[in-house]
Amino acid sequence: MEKPLDTFSAQEKGVVKRISAEGKLKRRLFDMGITRGAQIIMQKAAPLGDPLEINIRGYELTLRKAEAQAVIMEVTD
Amino acid sequence: MKFALAGNPNSGKTTLFNNLTGSTAHVGNWPGVTVDKKEGVYKRGTDKIGIIDLPGIYSLSPYSPEEIIARNYILNDTPDDAPDLIINIVDATNLERNLYLTTQLLETGIPMVIALNMMDVVEKNGDTIDVKALEAAIGIPVIPICALKKNGIKELIDKSVAAVKAGKMPTTILKESKISDVYCEVLDEVKKRNTKHEVFVAVKLIEGDDLIKRAYTDLVPTITAILEKNPQPDHDNDYESLVADMRYQYISSNLSIHQTKATKNTNVTRTEKADKVLTHKIWGIPIFIVIMFAVFHIIFSGDFLYLSIYGLEPIEAPGVYLQTLVGELSGMGIEAIAGALENQAVWVQSLVVDGLLGGIDAVLSFMPQMLLLFLFLSIMEETGYMARVAFILDRAFRNFGLSGRALLPLLMCFGCGVPGIMATKGLENEKERKISIILAPFFSCGAKMPIWAVFAATLFLERGGEFVVFGMYFLGIATAILVTIILRKTIYKGSVPHFIMELPNYHRPQVRSTLRHLWDKVIHYIKRVTLVIAGAVVIIWLLSSFSFTFTFVEDIGDSMMGIISKGLTWLFIPLGFAMGDQGWMFVVAVFTGLIAKEMVVATLGVFSGMTADEILEGGELAGTGIAALLSALSIPAAIAFMAFNLLSVPCLAAVGAASGELRNKKSLWGAIGIWLLTAYVISFVLYWAGTYWWIGMTLGIIAAVIITLYILNYKGIIKLSKIFGKTPDKKTLQL
């Protein structure tokens, strides 16, 4: 099933399918390791509901829902 | 020989730098750069090797100022400045993402070694990395080090020196990839230009790097044609995405396979456990508030641990105690010097004692509290907690068009605006940086504290004195929010900056490096502030001690400063505090406050025949000269006076820092204009609202109304756009 990263619930896992962003945002996502095929585990949302904390390539990364929306994921089990 | 240290933020670069350079390290400001590069010297026998600490970066892309600085330094051709070697520091606990930068650095063709840091943590976690195999795969020396414990440093330098001698050819993963044909064709075109760093330029042209495209405009059509000839349907013909993917694929299939992860990672579990509490959905924010409250209590409280509640004798908090101690010592010093000058001319005594020493005393007086605040903030930063605070509060900051990253510099401003403004360097987004600099003075700094304290102990003594101090902090924060919203809707329009940030594993603060960090700050600060203050103090002293005919005057009212202030008093009449016979004195205080805010109290002291020490030593002020002087003000006028001092142009040292960070005259004058306008408008409103309606809590009400209106507007309950005839750009707010 394909869906954007911001709709993931806690502990849901998936693999990056593509990035639908441009310019600086796209570059920043790549630089942080969010590229096609990378595994992501959703950790949690911040107390005010945004931003999100994810685990990628063995480390913890935080990004906003608006930015996570650009990361299109394939859900794995 | 020069070695550049390059690596991801938080990879242990600065620790390595400090260990390499030892006590010879110095912080140097390069002209025209935004982030401090540090240069130090490593002594190898009789050889001296220059070590350059570059800002921490994730890639060599041209987006954040740090990346551009690091890249410009690495690629520069100036004979004595160009690096002979790059020491790429790689965090072994986070191999894949760190090696991503490595693949880009290799393209520059500068000799390079990898310092594989934090190997001890890897081993402690039960993981292993086959260093030999990694070295063979990547083709450059890989040296395991532990920057903290100084292990492997000698081997690192030995291999580095050997690597410089051996030289290096640039390598890129594109050469043996599915787009090697495209790469070779582009490289051939670049080679015709006979430029340096051909491989780097070729790869960046394929990636579509803006800066490189601008530098080689004539090549762009040819390159575009080559790329279009080879469409990449898998990646929507997006070469930037293709190259990024290939880099990570190369890393995971060739390099990171040489690490074996233990099944259970203990260190990560510890961080996860801590995060369960510290970023908890319900407890996260209260815990942060308690921590901040404790920090401020330790530094500023006159009733440490609230002992007086239990009927015990109140004691001063450590911060207050240190401050009193330093104040007493400097007071003794000044007295001794004043005694030694007794036989000198009156103007010499006045210049040295009132002018120079007074200025130095002013700086020293809040130094201990400022340092303690930085110590706590550095500890929070080093342990990794500050990143969590940004995570927790980002959502709240976003309402005002800022990101959670702006928190650290703004918190620092409660100590002192100078380092706060300097810390805005870490913000990627230019508009966010500029707004943060403009907000800096609104956060009541340590030097403004004495002003509130004096008013609280005199005019407001029986009218809720403790509310004055609290109210000024609150007024500052409310004004900051208001100004940010207005700036975001007017001159600094645009989307809210992105917030994509690493949450590093928690670790214990390193006492030595924290103290060292602090020491660097002190030295930097003293240099910067004393120069400015000494100069300004002499000028103000001249203006307030001499008349226009250059004769020494005893009465400040006859001096140039007094005459100018009297002439400008009409400007401040609408603010209430400049009315009456003594009104001009408050105008003088506003002007002297521009040097350093504690001069405000000192100046008012001069007019009431008291010294700043007498006023601030904490004794009863009722019935003294200063109380009499301040009682000339009505309550609203006093509030307006305090608000004006809080919100207007900060001290010269902070203006100097702002001019350094804003980097152009137009922005600086813009900031000064905003400060003056904000101070004038808010003071005006407070005075008139207070005069006709003075229950003393006006400031609170106004601020509360503004915040409520904004929140209601944000939640869509009311529409400010209908009232002000403007459409709030919801889309950009949410981005």
Image (spheres, coloured by chain):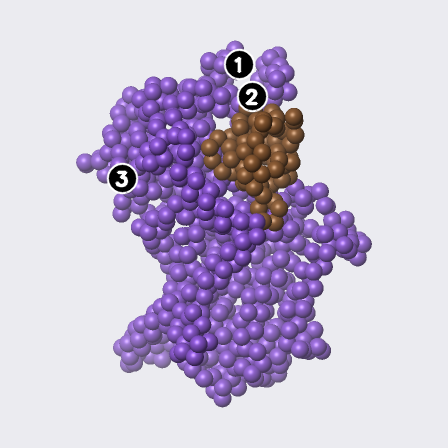
Chain colours: A brown, B purple
Q: Which residue is mark 3?
A: B150
Q: Is residue B120 visible?
A: yes
User: Which residue is rendered at x = 62% and y = 62% of the image?
Assistant: B478
Describe the element under mark 2 as helix, strand or loop: helix
Mark 2–mark 1 contact, CB under 8 Å? yes
**For residue B74, side relative to residue A71 (left or right):** left
Residue at the bottom extreme, as displayed: B623
| Relative side of A70 to B503, left or right | right
Q: Nearer the viewer, residue A12 or B507?
A: A12
Image coordinates for residue B566, horizontal then vertical, percent: 58, 77
Chain letter for mark 3, please. B
Q: Please state the chain letter of the residue tagged with numbered disc 2 in the rendered image.
A: B
Q: Of the residues shown, which amino acid type is indicated by label 2?
A: Leu
Q: CA distance from mark 3 to mark 1?
A: 42 Å
Name the residue tied to disc 2: B242
Query: 10 Å neighbourhood of mark 1: few (<14), some, or many (≥20)?
Result: some
**Where is mark 1, residue-wise?**
B179
Check disc 1 and report its element: helix, strand or loop.
Answer: loop
Crowding near the residue tagged with mark 2, few <14, some 14–19, many ≥20 C-alpha atoms within 10 Å = some
Asked if one can make out residue B4 in the rendered structure from this viewpoint, the answer is no
State which tag comes first along the sequence, 3 or 1: 3
The x and y percentages for residue B245 are: 53, 23
In the picture shown, does residue A27 fall above or below B238? Answer: below
* Mark 2 or 1, nearer chain start: 1
